[in-house]
């Protein structure tokens, strides 16, 4: 015979609550996986379309380069016209590399994430105790359980 909430023991109420929390967490993880799969498919499709567009644009750039070089060849020798077009592209590529390197030098790292993790460690360890270090005989458990 089922007991009323007033008649249930504290232990059984805690067990039910932890069971419900576990079910809720499992459901949330399953929802996140489903959403991630859906988004990953959309991102994959979009990436494929972007790659096709980039390939077509690259072909157009090659054809435009030949067009510019042949137009210049009307007023100067062929070799000089093609050399001018090549040098313009080399300068553009060099500038792109320079800007990219400068952007990489400006990276700050993951300072906020590191600070957040440090704060979580401090919260998780009461009274400033250090977390136990893994000994040489203990290794962290991996995803596959080994």
Image (cartoon, rainbow, N blue to C red):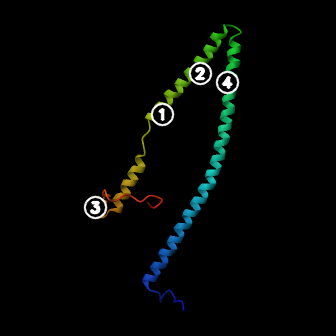
Q: Where is mark 1, residue-wise?
A: 103
Of the two numbered discs 3 and 1 on the same chain, state the one appearing first in sequence. Answer: 1
Displayed quadrant of residue 91: top right
Of labels 3 and 4, the one closer to you? 4
Q: Where is mark 3, residue-wise?
A: 129
Query: SS class of the residue under badge 3?
Result: loop
Of the two numbered discs 1 and 4 on the same chain, state the one appearing first in sequence. Answer: 4
Q: Are marks 3 and 4 in contact (CB under 8 Å)?
A: no
Q: Position of residue 42 (x, y in %)?
A: 65, 49
Q: Are marks 2 and 1 in contact (CB under 8 Å)?
A: no
* Cα distance between the residues tagged 3 and 1: 40 Å
Q: Residue at x 55, y 25 (%)?
A: 93
Query: SS class of the residue under badge 1?
Result: helix
Front-most of residues 112 and 69 = 69
Q: Residue at x 28, y 60 (%)?
A: 128
* Cα distance between the residues tagged 2 and 1: 21 Å
* Cα distance between the residues tagged 1 and 4: 28 Å
Q: Are marks 2 and 4 in contact (CB under 8 Å)?
A: no
Q: Image quadrant for the N terminus?
A: bottom right
Q: Are marks 2 and 3 in contact (CB under 8 Å)?
A: no
Of the two numbered discs 2 and 3 on the same chain, state the one appearing first in sequence. Answer: 2
Q: Where is mark 4, residue-wise?
A: 62
Q: Image quadrant for the C terminus?
A: bottom left
* Cα distance between the residues tagged 2 and 3: 60 Å
Q: Where is mark 2, residue-wise?
A: 89
């Amino acid at each position: 015979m089922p007991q009323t909430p007033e008649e249930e023991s504290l232990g059984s109420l805690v067990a039910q609550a932890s069971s419900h929390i576990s079910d809720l967490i499992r459901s949330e993880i399953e929802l996140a996986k489903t959403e991630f799969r859906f988004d990953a498919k959309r991102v994959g499709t979009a990436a494929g379309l972007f790659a096709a567009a980039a390939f077509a644009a690259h072909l157009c750039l090659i054809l435009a380069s030949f067009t510019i070089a042949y137009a210049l060849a009307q007023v100067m020798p062929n070799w000089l016209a093609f050399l001018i077009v090549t040098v313009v592209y080399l300068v553009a590529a060099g500038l792109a590399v320079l800007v990219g390197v400068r952007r990489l030098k400006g990276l700050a790292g993951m300072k906020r994430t590191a600070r957040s993790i440090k704060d979580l460690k401090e919260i998780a360890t009461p009274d400033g105790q250090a977390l136990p270090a893994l000994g040489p005989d203990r290794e962290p458990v991996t995803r596959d359980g080994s």
